[in-house]
Image (cartoon, coloured by chain):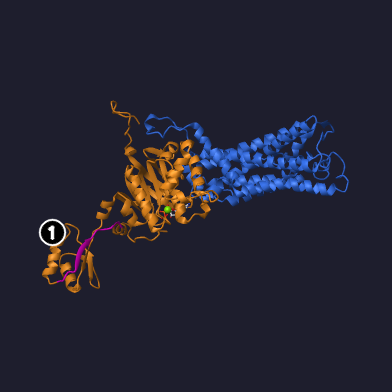
Chain colours: A blue, B orange
Amino acid sequence: MSRAEETEAPDTGVPETADTGVPAEKAARPPRANPLWALALFRSELTITLRRWRTLALLGVLALIPILIGIAVRIETSDGGGFGGGRGGEGSGPAFFPQITNNGIFLVFASLAATLPVFLPMVIGVIAGDAIAGEAGSGTLRYLLVAPAGRTRLLLAKFTTTMAFCLIATLVVALSSLVTGALLFPLGDVTLISGITVSFEEALLRALGVAALVALSLVGIATVGLFISTLTNSGIAAMATTVGLVITAQILDTIPQLHAIHPYLFPHFWLSFADLLREPVYWDELVKNLGLQGLYVAVFGSAAWARFTAKDITA
Amino acid sequence: MTTQNEGEPVEQRSTEGDDAAVETRGLTKRYRGGQLAVDALELSVPRGSVFGFLGPNGSGKTTTIRMLMGLIEPTSGRARLLGEPMPRAARSVLPRVGALIEGPALYPFLTGRDNLLRYDAADPTADPRTRAPRVAAALDRVGLAAAAGKKARAYSLGMKQRLGLAAALLQPRELLVLDEPTNGLDPQGMREIRALVRELAEEGTTVFLSSHLLDEIEQVCTHAAVMAQGRLIAQGTVAELAAGSRGRLAVTTPDPVDAVRVLKEHGVTDLVVLDERVSGELPLPGAAVDDPPLELADLNAALVRAGVRVRAFGAERASLEDAFVALTGEGFDVAG
Ligand SMILES: Nc1ncnc2c1ncn2[C@@H]1O[C@H](COP(=O)(O)OP(=O)(O)OP(=O)(O)O)[C@@H](O)[C@H]1O
Ligand SMILES: [Mg+2]
């Protein structure tokens, strides 16, 4: 799959080298461009992503999951019995499920915990994998580049959009669960994992923090997907590879013999967002998660840039 | 490079390629598979010309255009667009260049208008305040105003081609690079596009047009270059190129046998008889049997003197096609 080595252009070939200002080089300059005009590409990128039926369908599925979980829990507990009892929720059964019947806001945490391992990264993988490869495959990439979008700027626009999409996808899950939770279950003060009770308002704030953490947990795989997207001219291949990578990493993360590499797998600290629901908050793994995601962004972001700015666009 | 002419106005013509819209020096591309697609190309497209870029399939036209537009990196050699080096000056040059490369590419889920808005947004020098009117004008120019609200997936091949052209016309351009622009168009559409090209040329836009339709090049181009197997085998004005091959003489007569005899005596070669029509190649001036150049009127008189009844008589102007076949040898076969 890896075609990274095919780069044949020398590094002088980076088309975006800043103007060196050699005086004899100047000729008729294009009409004065307002630097703000360059931002149009970012807006265009985001609207074009959100206007596709595929994107809307994926977001629709994400919105549906909390509704299904909520209804299932409601039916399961409608005969009066509880959902297993214990308030810890760690180790036994899906996280946060037992608390949902008492407080609808737990549907937010339960849904995020349920979608983060597979659904969310899959959706991100589709969007990120298709970002460059899809345009290359359909040929629109060459017209963007001769517009000229500029390779660095285009990649940056794609990156920004993918990151924004991580947030949008997470917020869709969070909002759908909050609304479903409010409709199906009582709301009120929240007993945290550590046993301390906080007001509903503070719980809402923490839910927002959890959503932000989940979105940030996805930026690693999103950047990897973008890098893969620069390697091929087939959007489908890039999406499939990215999604395959998510699943592989998740499997590797469960194999105890491989514990030495676990701290470097992007999903390893994903569920650490639950630590935000403790009082005091356990920062250790949260910080490790953010650091790891940052590392993935730096490494694969640079790789994507190096690859994309030197790539021959032949499709 | 510094200019010697101190008192002169700011305009700089110091580099040789400055007045050429496209200039390449030893431009070469070898693809990863080892295929030598373009071989030491020396192209010079004068500003203001309509330049036809001819060549059989696989001769390297699109590869050249991709290098000119900075999409692929030349293996060696260099290219200048509007006097500036590519791909280094892409950011300042490309806003002044419109391009249609190997057919249009569209977002099928967007309308024609939204496709153009999208491409225009990709150009950092495009003023968002004038975007909508510019898009409307471009659509109008290619005759797509009525279909602007239709999804591009529902466009016909010719409509897509027109939309691709519209994208190249979103801004006033100094240079238009069009790779087979009439591909997929109906005869009426072809005529419209040719008219459009002429119109743009009159406005001062240099048009670089690749095609394998010889009569198309002949109809609209002032200059042409011929490629074969990645090499440039000729370039110049269309008239110069066509003059390179000799014209043919055609005589319609009920006495073809006598006509052939007389014409042969006067140095006409390659005689072909088709029913009542005799055609042959006129001798090159100076290379004739009798040294004074052959005057067509004399030839006609000679035929009549010999008792040949001439129904029609005329020289067919040498076409670019003749020149092309003469240059590429085998004509139009794809070279492996
Ligand atoms: N991406 C590629 N990788 C390898 N070889 C290629 C690639 N693209 C083109 N070629 C080869 O380079 C040569 C020139 O191709 P090119 O597309 O430039 O021809 P062309 O003159 O545009 O032909 P046509 O009239 O069919 O459009 C051909 O032999 C082709 O097989
Ligand atoms: Mg071609």
- Name the quadrant of the N terminus of chain B: top left
- Residue A92 vs residue A171: left or right? right
Q: Chain of mark 1?
A: B
Secondary structure beneath disc 1? loop
Which of the two residues, B230 or B302, is positioned nearer the viewer here? B302
Where does residue B129 sit, x and y in percent of width and height?
A: 48, 36
- Residue A276 vs residue A56: left or right? right
Looking at the image, residue A34 lies above or below residue A4: above
Looking at the image, residue B8 lies above or below residue B295: above
Q: Which residue is mark 1?
A: B291
Where does residue A266 sit, x and y in percent of width and height?
A: 68, 41
The amino acid type found where label 1 is placed reads Asp
Magenta span contains residue B315? yes
Magenta span contains residue B143? no
Q: Which stretch did the figure color magenta?
A: B308-320
Which of the two residues, A83 or B236, is positioned nearer the viewer here? A83
